[in-house]
Image (cartoon, grey):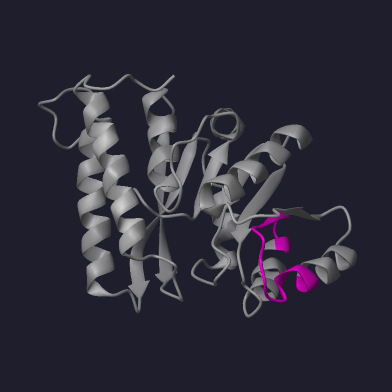
């Protein structure tokens, strides 16, 4: 089974080399350099020379944020016919040594690294993740009376494995998300198309994050769209 680890990166000069070296021990790696202005491009150029044919770099001239960074990595995976795509954070929040657990897990369309153990995560982030999970599960339920839905514990974790069927859908999808709400949108695309979803407990280490009030607002707006779709107020997903 061919696996590609897709990592969006923006100004990650302090961590990107360690992340790449950790991931490439277990799978091929595609980094989307989202118009970094620090030394990230130089580091990636050097690593590409060190790992020819196993490390790939997609460069953006303008910053496009997480959704386009991951989607472009998935488009590359479609082109090269990978069996799995695993998405990871570029800031050492996700343990690359857990990659074999993701790769060898039973077949499903989406495997979410559920953050069962956390380190240094602020209380407000835990609350946001908890509320987001409740809202997402209701949005994905089959009935307006089903408040539990699929009962997914962690709906916003970015450490995930996608099957070829799942990532091909997302790669060619007209995404509406613009930031961290991508993880909600990707989950909804897989779930509402009948894909199978599992969770794998992981340890999550909070690091410097671009999560802010604007990103939270975008996530709330996207959750609102899902609710409107559930109640047929706006058109369903294509």
The quadrant of the image that shows the N terminus is top right
In the image shown, does 124 or 150 lie closer to the viewer?
Answer: 124
Residue drawn at 88 percent across, 68 percent down: 50
> Is 109 placed above or below 208 here?
above
Quick check: can you spot residue 108?
yes
Residue drawn at 23 percent across, 73 percent down: 123
Measured as percent of width and height from the top left, residue 69 is found at: 60, 50
Measured as percent of width and height from the top left, residue 196 is found at: 42, 31
Count of residue discs? 0
Measured as percent of width and height from the top left, residue 103 is found at: 60, 49
Left or right: where 172 falls relative to 124: right
Quick check: can you spot residue 1?
no
> Is 182 placed above or below 190 here?
below
**Magenta residues, start to end:** 24-43
In the image shown, does 11 or 62 lie closer to the viewer?
Answer: 62
Give the image quarter of residue 38.
bottom right
Left or right: where 16 falls relative to 228: right
The answer to if 31 sits in the magenta stretch is yes
Left or right: where 48 falls relative to 228: right
Give the image quarter of residue 59.
bottom right
Left or right: where 141 falls relative to 159: left
The quadrant of the image that shows the C terminus is top left
In the image shown, does 116 or 88 lie closer to the viewer?
Answer: 88
Give the image quarter of residue 237.
top left
The answer to if 1 sits in the magenta stretch is no
Residue drawn at 64 percent across, 40 percent down: 74
> Is 45 placed above or below 201 here?
below
- Specify the farthest residue to the left: 145
> Is 30 placed above or below 185 here?
below
Measured as percent of width and height from the top left, residue 165 is found at: 57, 28
């Amino acid at each position: 089974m061919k696996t590609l680890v897709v990592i969006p990166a923006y100004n990650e000069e302090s961590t990107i080399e360690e992340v790449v070296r950790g991931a490439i021990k277990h799978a091929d790696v595609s980094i989307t350099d989202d118009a970094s202005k620090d030394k990230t491009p130089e580091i990636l150029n050097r690593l590409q020379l060190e790992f020819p044919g196993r490390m790939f770099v997609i460069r953006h001239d303008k910053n496009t944020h997480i959704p386009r960074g991951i989607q472009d990595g998935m488009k590359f995976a479609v082109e090269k016919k990978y069996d799995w795509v695993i998405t990871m954070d570029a800031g050492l929040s996700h343990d690359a040594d857990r990659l074999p657990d993701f790769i060898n897990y039973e077949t499903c369309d989406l495997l979410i690294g559920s953050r069962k153990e956390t380190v240094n995560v602020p209380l407000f982030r835990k609350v946001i993740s908890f509320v987001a999970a409740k809202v997402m599960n209701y949005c994905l339920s089959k009935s307006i009376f089903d408040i539990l839905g699929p009962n997914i514990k962690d709906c916003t974790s970015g450490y995930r494995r996608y099957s070829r069927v799942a990532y091909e859908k997302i790669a060619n999808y007209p995404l509406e998300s613009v930031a961290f709400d991508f993880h909600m949108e990707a989950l909804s695309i897989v779930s509402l198309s009948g894909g199978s979803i599992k969770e794998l407990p992981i340890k999550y280490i909070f690091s410097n994050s671009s999560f802010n009030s604007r990103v939270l607002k975008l996530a709330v707006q996207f959750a609102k769209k899902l609710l409107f779709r559930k109640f047929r107020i706006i058109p369903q997903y294509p």
